[in-house]
Image: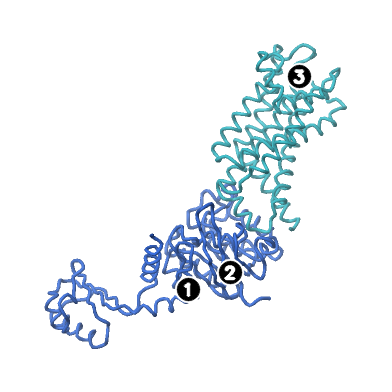
Chain colours: A blue, B cyan
Amino acid sequence: MTSSAISVSNLCKSYGSLRAVEDLTFSVARGEVFGLLGPNGAGKTTTVEVLEGYRKADSGDVQVLGLDPSVEGQLLRQQIGVMLQECGLYPGLKAYEVLRLFSSYYASARDPEALLDEVGLTRVRSSYVRRLSGGEKQRLSLACALIGRPQLLFLDEPTAGMDPIARAVTWDLIRGTVESGATVVLTTHLLEEAERLCDRVAIIANGKLAAIGTPKELTTNTERSDIRFSTRTTLDIDDLRLHLGLAQGAVIEESECEYRVFVRNTPDIFAALGVFLRSKNVEIESVDAGRQSLEEVFIQITAETSVEATP
Amino acid sequence: MRSEAVFAQIRVELSLTLRRGESLLVTLAIPLGVLVFFSKLDAVAPSGYNDPVDFLVPGVISLAVMSASMVSLGIATGFERRYGVLKRLGSTPLTRIGLIVAKTVSVLLLQVIQLILILSVATAIGWSIPLAALIALALVLVGSVAFAGIGLWLAGSLRAEATLALANALFLIMLFLGGMAYPVEKLPAVLESIAVLSPGAALSDSLRGVLVSGREFPFDSFLVLCIWAICAPLIAAKRFRWEE
């Protein structure tokens, strides 16, 4: 048994003259939750479909659970669970019939009824798939991916179309799968999802790996050099600038009651800001300082890559 | 692959077919309706038949074969492709062969139901089953292969709506111009020369050669049927795209 669940080196895949994935190299450890992030058309789905065995790489080496998906797909498919973006389930079957059908595909499948209960679909077990809501279809689709006790789970936008409660249930289910030893690869455009679930994320832009690391690593090196805050009532920005002892232009009003101070957030600066607000009796609504969010890092990285790509 | 998987798949394929009202209409109601209605019209059968039923039963059997293998199978598969069901199955341990076996068996089971109903109604309106009916079963199989090939050819290369429209159009054209409910001999000469090359006329004519007493087996029609049965599945396999 190899130590990594997935290892990809120098993967290239083109459709005609379009290079979908270029020289991609990364690996995913067993038991890890790995997120693939990137703007639409960045090459996420192509990458995942090569790993799942749907597409054959033009060049490069791909190993999934120690197997080559393009050659040993049949062996691989018994050990993976796949949730596609499209639900891909028979609209004319009832929820429990779909899950019972999928359970017949695997030698050591889980009990369909128990799994329906876990994903919270017992109430609609006898409803036709075509009558389920978007979020219910997603959860049924997830149940189909889980029924064969997969060692490796591929989830393409697993919580798209779900309300916040269903989303929380789904995240718990995914975490539960990981606790039982499975590896998870998920693509998402929800940065919150990546931050909450993923041990590591890779950001793909224009078919290339733009960044890889834990969410913390990706955000630590991007100490922001400003403080943003919003207040209930307006401030005099020149007054504030003088109080903080900063140069002309270091404090701006971005929009009404939203301010940005171009300075690193040392404790002294923060205390001075607090004193100033107290003296003016101004209540603060929100404040953003310190590390950038994964979302900001993502936007920055993808923006940089698309600038590079423009000739 | 597990045999449980194939059995479960057969069960699903068949129950999906029997659940779709439009599929029951085209595979059961229309063939039986054609049989009962046209058997009352003496004008339909060409000379050489004692009873219109003798002419009609083989035609209705080919109509049933066409409706199950081409229309029902083709449309269902086209929409499975559209909804991403085929793609989703591609990531499970169910193999392509397993899926094809399941679809084949479910179509054959549907045809068993069709034949039982058609033969019961035919017997009720005065038709007697000849001994040669066993040979007719072999012809039904060849015809199924030809029509399933056409159905999957449409399903695998066209949009689901186009498959729906075209399969239904071919059904109607073949019903009247394919020697099923109306003899090709009575068509205008130009139409007749085209119609005899259709799989519908080829199957109906071959079946009449076996089921109607005193008729010689039409080897030319049988040859046309065999060509369809070989070429249509090959083209279907070559043109089939699993994703729309």
Whole-percent x, y for residue A188 in the image: 47, 64
Which numbered disc covers residue A260? none
Whole-percent x, y for residue B76 in the image: 61, 41
Point out the image quarter for the N terminus of chain B: bottom right
Q: Nearer the viewer, mark 3 or mark 2?
A: 2
Of residues A26 and A129, the one nearer the viewer is A26
Quarter residue A142 falls in:
bottom right
> What is the chain identity of the residue bearing mark 2?
A
Quarter residue A121 falls in:
bottom right
Whole-percent x, y for residue B187 in the image: 67, 15
Looking at numbered disc 2 in the image, what kind of residue is underneath it?
A: Val
Q: Name the residue under label 1.
A: A212
Q: How many residues crowd mark 1 within 10 Å: few (<14), some (14–19), many (20+)?
A: some
> What is the chain identity of the residue bearing mark 3?
B
Work out whether disc 2 and disc 1 sit on a shared chain: yes
Find the distance from the CA under tag 3 to the CA under tag 2.
Answer: 65 Å
- Please report contact status of discs 2 and 1: CB closer than 8 Å, yes or no: no
Looking at numbered disc 3 in the image, what kind of residue is underneath it?
A: Phe
Which numbered disc covers residue B55? 3
Q: Nearer the viewer, mark 3 or mark 1?
A: 1
Q: Who's the residue at 27% across and 86% down the image?
A: A266
Q: Name the residue under label 2.
A: A8
Task: Find numbered disc 2 in the image and state the secondary structure of the residue it sits on.
Answer: strand
> Is residue A276 placed above or below A141 in the rendered structure?
below
Quarter residue A83 falls in:
bottom right
